[in-house]
Amino acid sequence: MEKTTLFDKIWDSHVVRHVPAGPDVFFIDKHFIHEVTSPVAFLNLEKRGIGVKYPHRTIATPDHNVPTVDQDQTIKDKLSRMQVEKLRENCRKYGIELHDLGTAHHGIVHVIGPELGVTQPGMTIVCGDSHTSTHGAFGAIAFGIGTSEVEMVLATQCIMQSKPKKMRISVEGELGKGVTSKDIILYIISKISAAGATGYFVEYAGSAIQSLSMEARMTICNMSIEMGARGGLIAPDETTFNYLKGRQYAPKGEDWGKAVAYWKTLKTDEGAVFDKEYHFDAADIEPMITYGTNPGMGIKVKDRIPTAEGLEGSNKASFLKSLDYMGFEPGEPVKGKQVDYVFVGSCTNGRIEDIRAVAEFVKGKKKAENITAWIVPGSREVEKMAHEEGLVQILEEAGFELRQPGCSACLAMNDDKIPAGKYAVSTSNRNFEGRQGPGARTMLASPLTVAAVAVTGRITDPREVFDN
């Protein structure tokens, strides 16, 4: 009997038709949409006189460019207002479930899907957003698609897709103090580069991965795209099942038992072959931070920025250009550099565990005077829990500003922008030029490292602040 990978098992069971020497016609179980990449898709359906094939398989929420203050009022930005209104109109017209601003389950699309139990093992999931790979944490094949493919899914519930190659990244051992899942993924990307997994779908494995909570696993899978991968996934286990049990859209009664029995089959067979494998030792992973303008330009917080030695041609030019944009010098330490903003939020680290970690770290402390500190919950549910658990009070006493749910300062599509030339240490997923605002300088890090930066006002190894 052929040994197959988890990825193969899910992919092959969703192929409707193989196109000779072409892509597969691939069935999609769940489709998430938001206000930015869906309006044109709906417009094209209308022009062609086509309806939505299975409205119940699509779920909508506005998140990318919504304001994170005064969400009960009319959106001031005209384009944002139009896009949100168009999303409402299309959901009404086609009978699509919408979690709108102000409703109990509004939030970032990749946060509310798992919260609601919509995201389940063995599914195929797409969204017009690159960080759809987040849902792979549940043992699902999840990836971002373009607007034309959004239209295709709405019309047919299928897309044309070539099967990617398979990669397995194993992390074995115990994580050290102050090391989080964000550090794991930044470490991996720094080792294999921002293009190191291009053309692959990645399965994360090993004892260090298995020890993680569901929210931590989502952080890992979320950033698969930042090393060029099509997506990432982790085999479901008891941690997965415990997270899903009792959630709104999770199977109930007898169906739960049947679902878990199936989900337990979703694992890579021993001896199955991957196109590429990497192995990393958890003991070598420490708190990480980026210093450049792509997520692969990362180092341990305690280390120095690399030099250009050994780089040639365009590689050397792009490296030096990146450092020039950031205002850094080759070979210098990042530790101790002064920072202006910190941001905790996004589909990478805007979940309740992230906010708990920051609140625990800053309890009884104050943010530094030079720091503007924003905390943006990934959903109304996260916001509600943060209030109920007393986290908001702790954070506000420390000088943090809690805003309302949305993508916020992860990307410059809303009002939450970092001013030009200012440094932001962010829990989000991208540090491209201008990603958080024109001229903004972004350094990616874990919630713990962000908390340490907030209270010291400069780049700090969180392990040095723990007991102070």
Image (cartoon, rainbow, N blue to C red):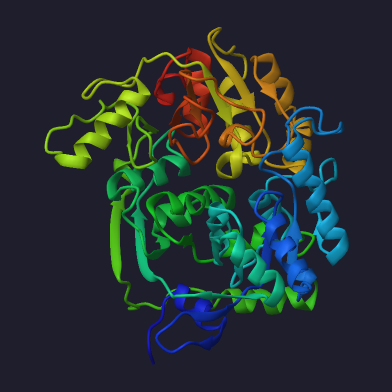
On screen, 88 above or below 370? below
Residue 99 can be seen in this image: no
Say how many tags the image has: 0
Describe residue 317's horizontal placement relative to residue 120 as left or right.
left
Query: Most extreme residue toward the front, as rendered?
Result: 47
Image quadrant of residue 287? top left
Describe residue 449's horizontal placement relative to residue 349 as left or right.
left
On screen, 436 above or below 7? above
- Please tell me which residue is depicted at 59% across the width and 37% down the height of the picture: 354
On screen, 210 above or below 175? below
- Please tell me which residue is depicted at 68% across the width and 77% down the height of the picture: 156
- Please tell me which residue is depicted at 64% across the width and 41% down the height of the picture: 351
Q: Residue 433 at x, y = what percent? A: 43, 33
Residue 127 can be seen in this image: yes
**In front: 87, or 443?**
87
- Please tell me which residue is depicted at 57% across the width and 28% down the height of the picture: 343
Image quadrant of residue 28? bottom right
